[in-house]
Amino acid sequence: MSIAGNLARVQEQMRAACRRAGRQPESVQLMAVSKMQSPERIVEAYAAGLRLFGENRVQEFAEKQPALAAAGMFTGRAAASFHLIGPLQSNKAARAAQLFDAIDTVDSLRLAEKLNQIAAAANATLPVLLEIKLSAETSKHGLLPESAELALLLECAPDWPHLQVRGLMTVPPYSENLEAVRPYFRRLRQLRDVLTQQYPRLALDQLSMGMSHDFPVAIEEGSTCTRIGTAIFGTRPSLDTRQE
């Protein structure tokens, strides 16, 4: 099926999940995970109506950006937005802040402080999400929900004028049994609700959770942004499924 056909099917599944949860479809954004996709495929997705994209690697997106710009994806009222959804090393933070509209995987106090400094030097404001680790898998990254580091980051965040902490994201363990991943999504929503009460100066209104195989359950549990790759683009030429 074409990207446009795949997109229509995903959007209908999203609407159905919203109906089950008693939510408005407009309350959930669809992020097309375009990692490892060619510029041509990304332009095709843009032509199908997608405007929000997620990339995993700084260098990969830097190499694709000129072709996407030449296709007009970054100009006008229908400009596309690209978020970094893969792990970010400190030595690539400056380049990432320059390339991306938002960083969705801030996983340490040190990285948050550095991004604020980088954005300040550019006289810009950088939206970010905090990546939360809810599973014991060693392959997963993120701040632990009960950690002192997360608490300190949230205490400091309102005083960082150039960093806008907008919410949380997580990557649960993979399971074909969707009910097995539901508790992870529910826990992130509950954590967000608690932190919103504890840190009222922050607008933690975004929950990035749900991927191609489990996004309906994530929407039922409160996701405001689903990260969909293979269900839109088809199978990638790699087994890398780190953030989608």
Image: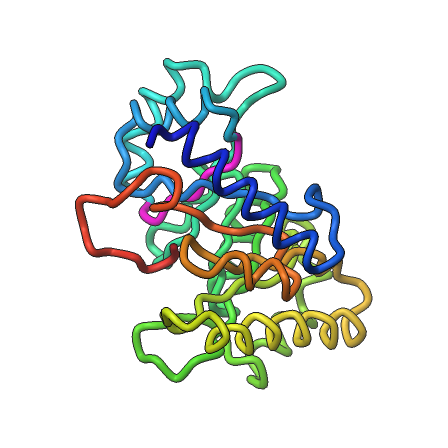
Number of numbered discs = 0
Q: x, y (%) of residue 143?
A: 50, 74
Residue 60 occupies quadrant: top left
Residue 199 located left or right of residue 137: right
Q: Residue 52 colored magenta?
A: yes
Q: Which residue is pictured at 50% across the width and 50% down the height?
A: 103
Q: Residue 13 location in percent, x, y?
A: 54, 47
Identify the image quadrant of the C terminus. Answer: bottom left
The region drawn magenta spans 51-57
Taking 100 as reference, is 208 left or right? right
Q: Is residue 69 magenta?
A: no
Which residue sits at x=63%, y=76%?
Answer: 152
Task: Please provide percent x and percent y for residue 156.
Answer: 67, 68
Is residue 212 positioned above or below 143 on the image?
A: above
Q: Is 198 rendered above or below residue 217?
A: below
Quadrant housing residue 165? bottom right
Name of the residue lying farthest toward the left: 237
Residue 223 vertical position relative to residue 71 in the rendered view, above or below: below
Query: Does the image show residue 234?
Result: yes
Task: Name which residue lies at 58% across and 51% down.
Answer: 225
203 or 24, which is in the foreground? 24
On the image, the x and y values in percent for residue 210 come to 50, 59
Q: Is residue 152 or residue 66 the one in the foreground? A: 66
Viewed as shown, does residue 213 lie left or right of 131? Answer: left
In the image, taking residue 163 as reference, residue 205 lies left or right, namely right
Which quadrant, please, contains the N terminus?
A: top left
83 or 162: nearer the eye?
83
